[in-house]
Structure formats: C-alpha cells, structure tokens
Amino acid sequence: MINRLTNDDMMDLVQKSLDAAALEHQVISNNLANVDTPGFKRSEVLFPEKLRQALEAKKAEQDEFELARTDPRHVSLRPEIDLSKIEPEVVTQYQTSLRNDQNNVDIDVEMAKLAQNTVVYQALAQITANQFSQLKSAMTEGK
C-alpha cells in the first residue's frame, strides 16, 4: 500500500506540474514588472503543451500492438516515452510588438494568465496535500 502511495507516476507528474506552475508565475511576474520597459519582449512557459503531447504519445503507444521482448537486451521497435523527462521551457516572444516602443506585454492578458496559473497551482497543491494525507493515514493505520 505504501509503495503504491509513494511511487506513483501521477504524483511525479503533479510535482513537475507544480514546479512548472511556479516557474510560470515567475515568468508572468517578470512580464508584468516590465510592462513599461521599452523593447521588452514577453516570455512564456511551454509545459502544458509538451505534457499533453507526451501523454497523447504514451496513450497511442499503449493502444498499439507491442512485440514481445524475451530478453532485456532486445531492441524495442519504438522508443519508450518517459514522462519524468518532460521539463518546462521558457521561450521569449520576439515576433510581436504591441506598441511603438517594441514592447509586447499586454497587462490584461498577463493578469488573466496569472489568475489562471494561480488556480492551477492551488489545485495541484491540493492534490499533493490529499496524497500526503492518504500516506499519513496509511502509516497511522487510519487512526
């Protein structure tokens, strides 16, 4: 029971998502802090897209027919998808400009992204708290 609670792939994904949400909060805060800086270009975190693509690829992998490997040294016909290797990536948007000073930060868009990211972070934190509560309950045998 405890093994299942502590070695869960889902919790690894939640932890990575929490880290990505914290990074996104920093990036959005930096964008907001530089809303009036001439020439500043906004940045954003690419994590949800990368995670979605990896999950879709993993699902497609599970739906396909897999050849039997009778020895661990046998080569797999398709690469194994490791969700733990997905990392958030910060990219800067150089292509756009909203104003004459070449700044491309829209305060309304950034505030909306900040609110959305806050809700996501709180939900992920609640999932983590629930997981630790279950672990505590398992260790104390429900007492």
Image (cartoon, rainbow, N blue to C red):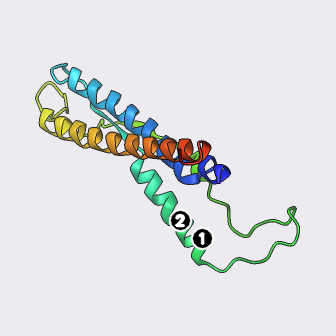
Q: Is residue 80 above or below residue 15?
A: below
Q: Which residue is found at the position 22% from the left and 21% from the top?
A: 33
User: Badge 1, how many Cα within 10 Å: few under 14, some, many 20+?
Assistant: some
- Label 1 and label 2: CA atoms lie apart by 6 Å
**Residue 74 shows which numbered tag?**
none
Which secondary structure lies at badge 1? helix
The image shows residue 34 at horizontal and vertical percentages of 22, 21
User: Label 1 belongs to which residue?
Assistant: 61
* Residue type at tag 1: Glu
Q: Residue at x 11, y 31 (%)?
A: 99
Between 78 and 126, the one lying in front of the other is 126
**As drawn, is 124 to the left or to the right of 32?**
right
Q: Check disc 2: other Cα within 10 Å, few if <14, some if 14-19, many if 20+.
A: some
User: Which residue is outermost to the bottom?
Assistant: 65
Indicate left or right for 47 with 87 as reference.
Answer: left
Amino acid on which disc 2 is placed: Ala
Residue picked out by circle 2:
57
For residue 63, what is the image quadrant? bottom right
Please give the name of the residue rendered at 54% of the width and 72% of the height, measured from the top-left corner: 60
Quadrant in which the N terminus appears: bottom right
In front of the other: 22 or 133: 133
Question: In the rendered image, which quarter is residue 40 located in?
Answer: top left
Count of marks overlaid on the render: 2
Q: Is residue 33 left or right of residue 76?
A: left
Residue 16 spot, x, y in % from top left: 50, 42
* Residue drawn at x 59%, y 47% as measured from the top left: 141
SS assignment at label 2: helix
Place of residue 42 in the rendered image (x, y in percent of width and height, measured from the top left): 27, 32
Q: Do callouts 1 and 2 mark residues in contact (Cβ within 8 Å)? A: yes
Where is residue 14 shown, x and y percent of the image?
47, 46
